[in-house]
Image (cartoon, rainbow, N blue to C red):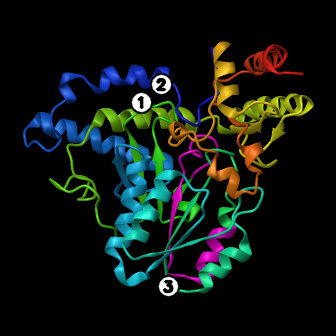
Amino acid sequence: MIYFDNSATTFVSDSVRAGLQELTDISVSANPGALHKLGNRAMELYEGIRRETSELLGAKPDEIFFTSCATESANTAIKGYMSRNKRAGKAVISTRTEHKATLECLEYLAKNGYEIRYVKVGPDGKPLSDSLEEELGKGGVALACFTLVNNETGSVLPFDMISKTIKSKSPSTVIYLDCVQALGKMPVDLAKLGADMCSFSGHKIHSIKGNGVLYVKKGVRIDPLILGGGQQDGMRSGTQSAVLAGAFLNALKDVSSGIEEAREKVSEINGYLRKELIERGALILSPDDALPYVLNVSFKGFESETMLHCLEIYDIYVSTVSACSAKSKKVSYVLLEMGVDRKIAANAVRLSFSRQNTMDEAKEFIRCVDAIYDQFLVK
């Protein structure tokens, strides 16, 4: 099997799997909110996990909140900030290439009287500076929402430029950043990054599904999305799970080491595939400076879903659009927003890699593509 669909989800790592047994031991399985010693022990474990997670992310423990997924983190950050800070302004700026978790939150805000201003992006998927300055110049921008690495193309946000522009034109604007596809693939130090709120997902870094993280910078006030017993400093009610938080931490430990070495390995795979596919008439839709973990390619003569199922015959797994939109069978809105012709976008397939992929897999992929063209393409 060749699995090139790591942007959708990653397989659980051996260290995460092994850690689950320790995290589910009866000695630490009590409710962390209980007053007896078993509850105290569970709370100590949980807070220790929170502290280690914050250290690896470059944050303070009280800035880290465990959630069920990045979608919950996005909803909490975006809705929560606008709900809590009604005097900050009625406008939010973003792009139309954001993940559905962000776009649906913005649509919700629009239906509730907020103004959503969309910054235009260029052919490389990056926000155009002139458009950003224009939208900021209209005033009243409470929140800016962007993605550090696009999940469909691998386009890397020029965040330093974005942040400096926002802070110079609209100093009070708070920045929410989707860091899901960046974590473990490029250095992420929240203390240095400059974003006010960030979301992360466990199952994108070889953890189990059902765990994510929300970072909220000290001093940024938001309303909680989930109400109840007031756990996690009142930010996210519900019994704390050391199992899920620990699974995230164990995965984070793995991907936080050897980032540069892994990137070099994946860059070699990406570069090989780019060269071979271009020689076969395919169009590369990811920008040249994209993060190498994502390669979006349009296959001449094959609609995206057709190529996906042809590759599946050879036990090769890729995706078309984002997994969150795949069932709708629509053409990628990200590619269309970048100015890609609809017919080309309709043939687009996303290959997404992890540090576990190999060059041998890349070579076998090309061999199978050749076989598919020989067998199925009408000449």
Q: Is residue 84 magenta?
A: no
**Residue 160, how many percent across, how many down?**
67, 66
Marks 2 and 1, Cα distance to the nearest angstrom? 6 Å
Residue at numbered disc 2: 12
Given residues 41 and 360, the one toward you in this image is 360
Helix, strand or loop at mark 2: loop
**Residue 358, how many percent across, how many down?**
72, 21
Residue type at mark 2 is: Val
Task: Tell me if I can see residue 196 in this picture.
Answer: yes
Extent of the magenta region: 161-188
* Residue 140, numbered label: 3
Q: Earlier in the sequence, mark 2 or mark 1?
A: 2
Name the image quarter holding the C terminus. Answer: top right
Q: Is residue 180 magenta?
A: yes
Instruction: Tell me the residue at 69%/50% (across/down).
Output: 335
Q: Earlier in the sequence, mark 2 or mark 3?
A: 2
Q: Is residue 350 left or right of residue 113?
A: right
Q: Is residue 52 left or right of residue 327?
A: left
